[in-house]
Image (cartoon, rainbow, N blue to C red):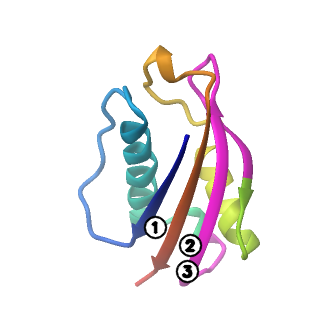
Amino acid sequence: IFFFASVLFANATPVKYPMVSSTDDLKSVILNTIKSDYQEPGNFLNNKEINSLRDRVQISFMVDSNKEIKIITAESKKSVSSEYIKQLFNNKQINIDESLVLKHYKLIIELQYNAF
């Protein structure tokens, strides 16, 4: 399954994650996780003293039997972008329908991060 996503920095309220029952739900959880993380003062990018980041990350992942995301690959032009995605999602437990477990997914994420 392959899908494309774009993430922009935006002011948003904290995210509540519903049950993931489709690939669209899974995509939403990933995008909302990134948007929410952008809001955190001590996020990975902030700790690396990165004020602005524009990059595309292509990830391949699966959700294992423990309902944890396992990043298989994360490729980008800037290594910090791949590192960011890996640390944010690898081993992240999600509430997902059994029908989506043990399947491989691919996603392209457009990161656009600006710290203010």
Q: Which mark is residue 89?
A: none
Label 1 amino acid? Pro
Q: Nearer the viewer, mark 3 or mark 1?
A: 3
Where does residue 95 sit, x and y in percent of width and height?
43, 25
Mark 3 is surrounded, within 10 Å at the Cα level, by few (under 14), some (14 to 19) or many (20 or more) other residues, namely some
The picture places residue 35, in percent across and down from the top left corner, at 39, 60
Left or right position of 16 against 49: left
Find out whether the residues at labels 3 and 1 contact each other: C-beta distance under 8 Å: no
Quadrant the C terminus occupies: bottom left
Q: Earlier in the sequence, mark 3 or mark 1?
A: 1
Looking at the rendering, the stretch of residues picked out in magenta corresponds to: 46-73
Question: What distance separates the C-alpha of mark 2 from that of mark 1?
Answer: 7 Å
In this rendering, the answer to whether 24 lies above or below 82 is above
Foreground tag (2 vs 3): 3
Q: Does 54 appear above or below 26?
A: below
Q: Are marks 2 and 3 in contact (CB under 8 Å)?
A: no
Q: Tell me which amino acid carries mark 3.
A: Arg
Residue 90 drawn in magenta: no
Find numbered disc 3 in the image and state the secondary structure of the residue it sits on: strand
Residue 41 — which label?
Answer: 1
> What residue is disc 3 on?
54
Distance, label 3 to label 1, CA atoms, is 19 Å
Number of the label disc, if any, that sits on residue 46: 2
SS of the residue at dot 2?
helix
Taken as a whole, is the magenta stretch helix, strand or loop? strand
CA separation in Å, label 2 and label 3: 14 Å
Q: Earlier in the sequence, mark 2 or mark 3?
A: 2
